[in-house]
Image: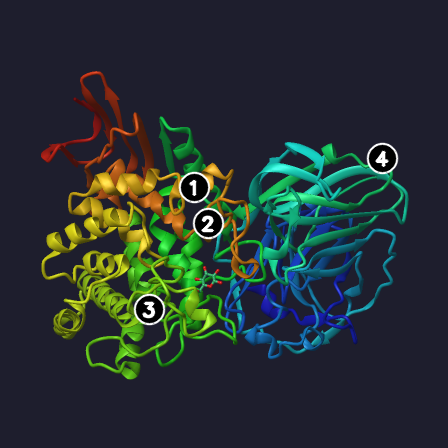
């Protein structure tokens, strides 16, 4: 990369909170054949050449394991060039310069690194000559019109502020971390018009976009210089209809804009928000809420999956699942897009990954994130709980760190691309080799930190949690949860190793020891729903049918309610269906009361919530401290709808061969799933008719179709059964 020839530059003596704009004027006296800008920074930037934005990448350079990897973008800028040119690049704090970031070495924002830029313009003239314009002290820099910027803060803008340029200063910062862009770019994807604007009981002026989302607002207006426009963001209104922001915790999540004179429009350049509602906190005289749009942002990915049913509430759930994925696949897979986290939680990432691969082509998206996971993995094998990592955070533990094995294996299954497992094989092995160094019991994973079955609902009555942290966890045995995930990761290493032609005999011996130890330790102590589900899902049960029957009975006995948390829920319906209890699986999916997937839909949700009862039946909230309305762990149920309800599963990696075994249920009239695989389109639908069920199936490859337990093998084509 030519950027290696450039120097890092900064604004002399500028505090880390200053949002500078770097400027370089240059002439192109001869006819230009091609011109390319390579650029990156220690924050997020927007580049503008001759008044036009360079590229469509919002929030470039994205978020990576910055200590080791910082992406460089390469833009073709030939079409933007004039004879005399001005390139301006504004650098905000972004993900790089924020609290808890190891690369800043401090938690105090005042001590963060200042904004720094590195870039080079490479011009090739028609006559064959070349010119390089690297960042150096010939560049100038000024404070920009953005007076405050941060991922959680939002943006403060003063359009009356005039730049005062000075020479930029060369500074010393690593160029070894620079890598070419790997992930898909984040782009503006959709524009949403306000559904309505209204006054709340507290007389707040609120705009409703009708959809919870990730992105920012844009507006157009006439104003006088110095007039102010300010927005706050919210996902939901409280039970009285007032604006609710407490669940954003310390994330300010606001835009403050000081107008210039005349007609103007604006959108934030260096931040994003998770929101459905905007509160207009102040506005110029005559400002019209109808002139605001919401701009939806997410990583560029091709849609591959569609679900549709005869039930409007279920269709709303499908829509909510899709929007939750869009909202949280913003450069990295995040837990939520609104509060002061927005982290790449490994547990959430793996929990939703299978559903995510049904709905979008996520190959490039995960390839980058997995590279960050490898970069963040500690030498002793532990995988941080959030990727990119943060100092204040610890090993993820079972279910979280196991993302290192589960995600690449899932990507291999969905896309048939062996490189996902070959790239991650050493990292998976390192993680499972870490376990024996910390466990308290040989061949199991015990006595170690874990989030357990996070957010499970199965505290027995009168249970007093030992700490506040534990109150958010279920009652499943932590050692069992850890050991079950350990077994699964070892099993993945065995399967991956075989595909890669590795000797896995030691892992096979380890796996059978784990199974034996697991049965001995937990075989007769499978109490909670999650304990049963994990034992079934990871094939650790001695008598799986009896265990699944017991699980079904247990669910019925408590009023057909799930009690599973983050680790149990994604597998629950799968295991019920696998052992003949699809009726109960459907009951759980169609349940409209708490806890159930349609409960939030009945409360008007447009994305999936972190808690089943984020808004309780009486309209009050789950605690403010952890209450996201855009969290995809429970959205993982989509993979049961595609893979079991409509029955589409790969019979060979990448769907090179397919197995379709639908599991219809009379409580729904019809259901249809469409899936674009690397081998072509699969479609599976069923519909109840007067005299039975009509199945329609389309497949691009050899497929085993199983209907009512009867198997038929069909080739590429469209088929109707029943
Ligand atoms: C996140 C979760 C995450 C968890 C760890 C939360 O704050 O939002 O989804 O997995 O912490 O248990």
Q: Are marks 3 and 1 in contact (CB under 8 Å)?
A: no
Please give the name of the residue rendered at 46% of the width and 49% of the height, measured from the top-left corner.
613
Q: Which of the pair 471/57 is nearer the observer?
A: 471
Q: Residue furthest front?
A: 462
Please give the name of the residue rendered at 28% of the width and 50% of the height, measured from the top-left corner.
558
Q: Position of residue 614 (x, y in %)?
A: 49, 50
Label 3 sits on residue = 398
Q: In the rendered view, would you say 389 is above or below 149? A: below
Structural distance between the alpha carbons of marks 4 and 1: 40 Å
| Label 3 or label 1, whichever comes before in sequence order | 3
| Label 3 or label 4, whichever comes before in sequence order | 4
Dot label at residue 205: none
| Label 4 or label 2, whichever comes before in sequence order | 4
Please give the name of the residue rendered at 10% of the width and 62% of the height, measured from the top-left corner.
542
Instruction: Name the secondary structure under disc 4.
Output: loop
Taking 335 as reference, is 233 left or right? Answer: right
- When asked about the image quadrant of residue 440, the answer is bottom left
Q: Are marks 2 and 1 in contact (CB under 8 Å)?
A: yes
Label 2 sits on residue = 613
Q: Position of residue 332 (x, y in %)?
A: 49, 57
Dot label at residue 286: 4
Dot label at residue 599: 1
Instruction: Name the secondary structure under disc 2.
Output: loop
| Label 3 or label 2, whichever comes before in sequence order | 3
């Amino acid at each position: 990369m030519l950027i290696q020839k450039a120097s890092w530059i900064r604004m002399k003596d500028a505090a880390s909170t200053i949002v500078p704009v770097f400027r370089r004027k240059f002439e192109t006296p001869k006819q230009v054949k091609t011109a390319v800008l390579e650029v990156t920074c220690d924050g997020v930037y927007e580049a503008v050449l001759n008044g036009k934005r360079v590229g469509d990448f919002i929030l470039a350079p994205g978020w990576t394991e910055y200590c080791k990897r910082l992406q460089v973008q390469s833009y073709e800028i030939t079409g933007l060039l004039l004879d005399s040119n001005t390139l301006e690049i504004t650098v905000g704090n972004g993900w790089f310069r924020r609290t808890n970031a190891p690369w800043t070495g401090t938690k105090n924002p005042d001590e963060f690194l200042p904004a720094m830029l590195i870039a080079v313009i490479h011009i090739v003239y028609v006559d064959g000559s070349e010119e390089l314009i690297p960042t150096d002290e010939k560049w100038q820099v000024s404070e920009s019109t953005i007076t405050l910027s941060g991922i959680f803060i939002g943006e403060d803008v003063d359009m009356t502020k005039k730049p005062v340029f000075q020479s930029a200063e060369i500074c010393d910062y690593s160029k070894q971390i620079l890598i070419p862009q790997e992930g898909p770019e984040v782009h503006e994807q959709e524009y949403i018009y306000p559904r309505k604007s209204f006054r709340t009981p507290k007389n707040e002026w609120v705009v409703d976009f009708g959809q919870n989302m990730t992105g920012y607002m844009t507006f157009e207006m006439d104003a006088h210089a110095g007039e102010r426009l300010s927005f706050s963001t919210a996902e939901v209104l409280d039970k009285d209809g007032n604006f609710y922001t407490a669940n954003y915790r310390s994330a300010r999540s606001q835009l403050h804009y000081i107008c210039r004179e005349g007609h103007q429009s604006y959108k934030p350049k260096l931040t994003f928000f998770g929101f459905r509602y905007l509160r207009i906190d102040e506005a110029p005289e005559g400002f019209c809420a109808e002139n605001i749009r919401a701009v939806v942002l997410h990583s560029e990915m091709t849609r591959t999956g569609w679900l549709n049913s005869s039930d409007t509430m279920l269709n709303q759930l499908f829509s909510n699942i899709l929007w939750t994925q869009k909202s949280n696949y913003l450069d990295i897979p995040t837990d939520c897009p609104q509060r002061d986290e927005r982290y790449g939680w490994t547990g959430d990432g793996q929990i939703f990954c299978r559903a995510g691969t049904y709905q979008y082509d996520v190959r490039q998206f995960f390839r980058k994130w997995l590279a960050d996971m490898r970069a963040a993995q500690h030498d002793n094998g532990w995988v941080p709980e959030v990727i990119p990592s943060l100092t204040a955070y610890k090993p993820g533990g079972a279910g979280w760190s196991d993302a290192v094995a589960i995600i690449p294996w899932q990507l291999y299954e969905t896309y048939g691309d062996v490189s996902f497992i070959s790239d991650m094989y050493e990292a998976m092995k390192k993680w499972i080799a870490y376990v024996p160094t910390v466990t308290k019991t040989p061949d199991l994973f015990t006595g170690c930190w874990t989030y357990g079955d996070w957010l499970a609902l199965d505290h027995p009555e009168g249970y007093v949690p030992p700490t506040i942290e534990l109150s958010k966890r279920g009652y499943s045995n932590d050692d069992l949860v850890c050991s079950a995930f350990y077994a699964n990761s070892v099993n993945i290493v065995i399967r991956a190793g075989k595909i890669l032609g590795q000797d896995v005999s030691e892992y096979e011996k380890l796996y059978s020891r784990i199974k034996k130890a697991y049965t001995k330790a937990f075989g007769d102590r499978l109490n909670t729903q999650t304990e049963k589900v994990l034992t079934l899902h990871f094939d650790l049960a001695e008598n799986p049918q009896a265990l699944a029957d017991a699980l079904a009975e247990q669910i019925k006995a408590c009023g057909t309610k799930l009690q599973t948390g983050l680790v149990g829920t994604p597998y629950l319906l799968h295991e019920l269906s696998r052992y003949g209890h699809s009726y109960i699986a459907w009951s759980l999916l169609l349940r409209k009361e708490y806890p159930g997937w349609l409960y939030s839909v009945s409360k008007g949700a447009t994305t999936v919530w972190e808690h089943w009862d984020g808004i309780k039946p009486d309209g009050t909230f789950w605690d403010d401290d952890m209450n996201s309305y855009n969290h995809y762990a429970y959205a993982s149920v989509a993979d049961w709808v595609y893979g079991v309800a409509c029955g589409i599963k790969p019979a060979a990696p990448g769907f090179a061969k397919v197995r379709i075994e639908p599991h219809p249920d009379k409580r729904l009239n019809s259901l249809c799933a469409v899936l674009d695989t690397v081998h072509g389109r699969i479609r599976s639908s069923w519909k109840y008719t007067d005299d039975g069920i009509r199945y329609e199936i389309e497949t691009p490859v050899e497929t085993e179709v199983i209907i009512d337990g009867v198997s038929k093998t069909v080739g590429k084509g469209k088929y109707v059964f029943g």
